[in-house]
Image: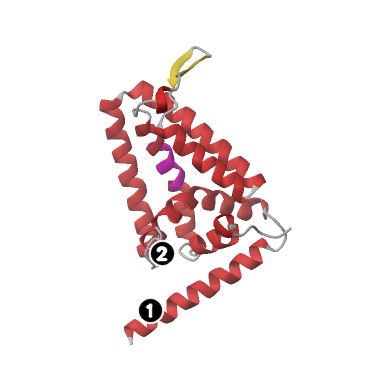
């Protein structure tokens, strides 16, 4: 089975992101910090109003009660989830499930914290996570983050990239046979091209 083309070309997306994340320590840092960024973004978006006056969903189970709001946070999680499933049905379904889990749990924590405390928690978490990633790039990768070259692709691909990287590393998962070899070839070619341009600028 081959890859998809166009906007859902997983090889292209993964190779782009992978070219900026080839150092093992930098990859590990991103594995730890990318999903908390997504989670805390959903947490603060909990306080946005419902889209088109959609009804709230009341969650009540195991003595826990809170409200799920179909707002911008929900829409963001939905967009990410659908995009990941379109990229790869298996790993994408797992990523979509994690997006849903993040939305539910971030809603719970936001409802418990309240806006006055939530934004402080989110700000602290975002600062720590972003600082960690910039250190990963500056100290270990020695290359600027992908978001400086393609902001939307970097933000959209980051959670799926680290998940797929983990599935490959720990379970040998491939979306289809030959995926890893094909992507690595594209990553190597992109890194070589970047190094050539860097060397020309220096000389």
- Residue 20, above or below 167: below
Q: Nearer the viewer, residue 134 or 161?
A: 161
Measuring 66% from the left and 61% from the top, which residue is drawn there? Answer: 179
The quarter of the displayed image where residue 69 is located: top left
Mark 1 or 2: in front is 1
Tell me the quadrant of the picture where the N terminus can be found. Answer: bottom right
Measuring 70% from the left and 63% from the top, which residue is drawn there? Answer: 178
Circle number at residue 167? none
Q: Do callouts 1 and 2 mark residues in contact (Cβ within 8 Å)?
A: no
Circle 2 SS class: helix
Q: Residue furthest bottom?
A: 203
The quarter of the displayed image where residue 187 is located: bottom right
Measuring 34% from the left and 29% from the top, which residue is drawn there? Answer: 48
Q: Closer to the N terminus: mark 1 or mark 2?
A: 2
Give the magenta range.
34-40
- Residue 45, above or below 182: above
Circle number at residue 198? 1
Report if residue 38 lies within the magenta region.
yes
Q: Nearer the viewer, residue 27 or 1?
A: 1
For residue 87, side relative to residue 128 (left or right) = right
Q: Which residue is mark 2?
A: 140
Report if residue 157 lies within the magenta region.
no
Tell me the quadrant of the picture where the C terminus can be found. Answer: bottom left
Circle 1 SS class: helix
Instruction: Give the image location of residue 139, x and y in percent.
Output: 36, 64
């Amino acid at each position: 089975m081959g890859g998809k083309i166009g906007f859902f070309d997983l090889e292209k997306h993964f190779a782009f992101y992978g070219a900026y994340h080839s150092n093992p320590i930098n990859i590990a840092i991103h594995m730890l910090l990318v999903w908390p960024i997504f989670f805390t973004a959903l947490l603060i978006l909990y306080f946005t109003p419902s889209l088109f006056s959609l009804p709230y969903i009341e969650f009540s189970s195991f003595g826990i009660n809170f409200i799920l709001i179909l707002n911008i946070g929900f829409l963001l999680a939905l967009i990410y989830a659908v995009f990941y499933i379109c990229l790869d049905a298996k790993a994408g379904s797992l990523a979509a499930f994690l997006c849903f889990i993040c939305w539910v749990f971030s809603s719970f924590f936001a409802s418990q914290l309240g806006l006055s405390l939530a934004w402080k928690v989110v700000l602290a978490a975002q600062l720590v996570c972003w600082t960690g990633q910039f250190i990963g790039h500056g100290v270990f990768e020695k290359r600027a983050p992908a978001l400086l070259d393609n902001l939307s692709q970097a933000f959209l691909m980051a959670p799926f990239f680290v998940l797929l990287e983990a599935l490959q590393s720990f379970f040998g998962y491939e979306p289809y046979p030959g995926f890893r070899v094909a992507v690595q070839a594209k990553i190597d070619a992109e890194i070589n091209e970047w190094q050539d341009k860097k060397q020309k600028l220096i000389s």
